[in-house]
């Protein structure tokens, strides 16, 4: 035996991952759409809300979730509610 553990995912574990991915994609797509509609770059958004470009990029990719204060800053920048971007 190789000593490696078999990592067999459970159905409930997979469902949680899929739901989280879908949730992230929902807001990441909205962020991208809002930015493109405004005609600005990721750098411009990041600078305006005082975060790094790599952080903002991670939000648009859906691989990181912004802190609540950053969610508020991003919503204010685009002139929409936090609810609209992150929870609708």
Image (cartoon, grey):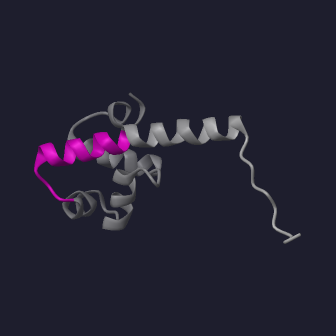
Whether residue 53 is visible, yes or no, is: yes
Q: Position of residue 51 (x, y in %)?
A: 34, 63
Please check the rendered image and state whether residue 72 is part of the magenta-colored stretch, yes or no: no
> How many numbered discs?
0
Question: Can you say whether 64 is above or below 52 in the image?
Answer: above
Furthest residue toward bottom: 2
Residue 54 appears in which quarter of the rendering? bottom left
Give the side of residue 46 with respect to residue 65, left or right: left
Residue at (20% x, 48% y) in the render: 35
Looking at the figure, which quarter contains the C terminus? top left
Give the side of residue 3 with respect to residue 56, left or right: right
* Of residues 1 and 62, the one drawn nearer to the viewer in this rendering: 1
Q: Position of residue 74 (x, y in %)?
A: 30, 48
Residue at (59% x, 42% y) in the render: 17
Q: Main secondary structure of the magenta part?
A: helix
Question: Can you say whether 32 is above or below 6 in the image?
Answer: above
* Of residues 59 and 9, the one drawn nearer to the viewer in this rendering: 9
From which residue to which does the magenta span run?
27-41
Furthest residue toward front: 1
Question: Can you say whether 87 is above or below 73 in the image?
Answer: above
Q: Position of residue 63 (x, y in %)?
A: 46, 54
Furthest residue toward left: 39
Residue at (38% x, 31% y) in the render: 83
Residue at (89% x, 69% y) in the render: 1
């Amino acid at each position: 035996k190789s000593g490696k553990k078999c990592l067999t995912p459970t159905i409930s574990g997979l469902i949680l991952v899929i739901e989280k991915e879908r949730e992230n994609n929902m807001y990441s797509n909205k962020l991208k759409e809002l930015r493109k509609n405004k005609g600005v770059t990721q750098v411009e958004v990041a600078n305006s809300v005082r975060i790094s470009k790599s952080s903002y990029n991670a939000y648009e990719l859906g691989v990181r979730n912004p802190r609540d204060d950053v969610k508020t800053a991003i919503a204010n920048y685009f002139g929409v509610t936090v609810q609209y971007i992150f929870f609708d």
